[in-house]
């Protein structure tokens, strides 16, 4: 199985301030950074920070721990697949206010974004995510302890059947900045088991 090798990682929309260690990454977000395409709101944003690797492996799981001190509306960090401006996926906790945040995910196929969220407390500052791939189908999961994972969503990614770019995401859609720390990055055989009829 291949590795999430930070020495080989590349940027889409590089942050002005970051630290890449041997086994962890710190990203300080630039203000007014985000991903979104068209749906409902009409606007198009395409400049969130993405540190990624590329693979054509069709069956694997990628797990990462995120820690963050977000304080402004829609601050977020998590996992991403980014093929181009009109085909990408992201998941993470989006800050709303001092009482509430959203555990959310967005899948953008052919230039239109969706948005799925669940309300959670704003005091939560740590989350694990797991992205699993089975050819062009994917599963996103989250965990509060890094052990017990729960399904967030299953989706088909139309431009995700061959080589994909995936990794870490952080952004601040408002005029704000915060630090996101990523650690415990691991790639394994696919932990999303095959569904047999």
Image (cartoon, grey):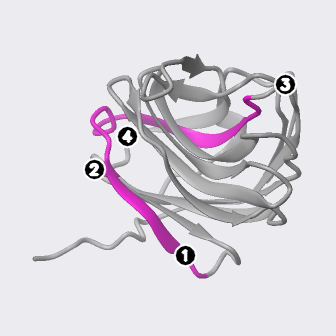
Task: Say left or right for 194 vs 133.
Answer: left
Q: Reading the chain from its start, which is encountered first: label 4 or label 3? A: 4
Q: Nearer the viewer, mark 4 or mark 2?
A: 2
Quarter of the image for residue 31 reads top right
Tag in front: 3 or 2: 3
Q: Residue at x 52, y 49 (%)?
A: 105
Judge the density around disc 2: few (<14), some (14-19), many (≥20) Cα neighbours within 10 Å: some
115 lies left or right of 125: left
Identify the residue position indicated by label 4 in the image: 56
Which mark is on residue 149? 1
Query: Which sits earlier in the primary sequence, circle 4 or circle 2?
Result: 4
Q: Earlier in the sequence, mark 4 or mark 1?
A: 4
Mark 3 or mark 1: name the one nearer the start of the chain: 1
Which residue is at a point 66% across and 39% down the rendered structure image? 169
Magenta-drawn segment = 148-173
Pinpoint residue 35: horizontal percent, then vertical percent. Answer: 58, 28
Report x, y in % for residue 6. 71, 42
Question: Can you give x and y, in whole percent of width and height, for residue 185 in the image?
Answer: 67, 57
Residues 1 and 31: in front is 31
């Amino acid at each position: 199985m291949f590795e999430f090798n930070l020495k080989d990682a590349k940027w889409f929309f590089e942050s002005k301030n970051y630290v890449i260690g041997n086994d962890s990454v710190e990203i300080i977000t630039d203000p007014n950074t985000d991903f979104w395409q068209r749906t409902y709101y009409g606007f198009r944003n395409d400049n969130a920070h993405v540190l990624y690797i590329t693979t054509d492996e069709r069956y694997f799981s990628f797990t990462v721990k995120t820690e963050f001190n977000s304080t402004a509306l829609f601050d977020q960090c998590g996992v991403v697949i980014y093929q181009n401006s009109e085909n990408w996926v992201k998941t993470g906790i989006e800050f709303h206010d001092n009482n509430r945040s959203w555990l959310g995910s967005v899948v953008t196929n052919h230039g239109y974004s969706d948005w799925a969220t669940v309300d959670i407390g704003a005091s939560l500052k740590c989350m694990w995510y797991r992205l699993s791939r089975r050819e062009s189908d994917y599963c996103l999961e989250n965990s509060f302890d890094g052990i017990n994972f729960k399904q967030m969503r299953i989706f088909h990614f139309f431009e995700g059947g061959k080589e994909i770019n995936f990794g870490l995401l952080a952004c601040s859609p408002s005029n704000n900045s915060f630090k996101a720390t990523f650690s415990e990055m691991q790639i394994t055989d696919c932990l999303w088991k095959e569904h047999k009829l």
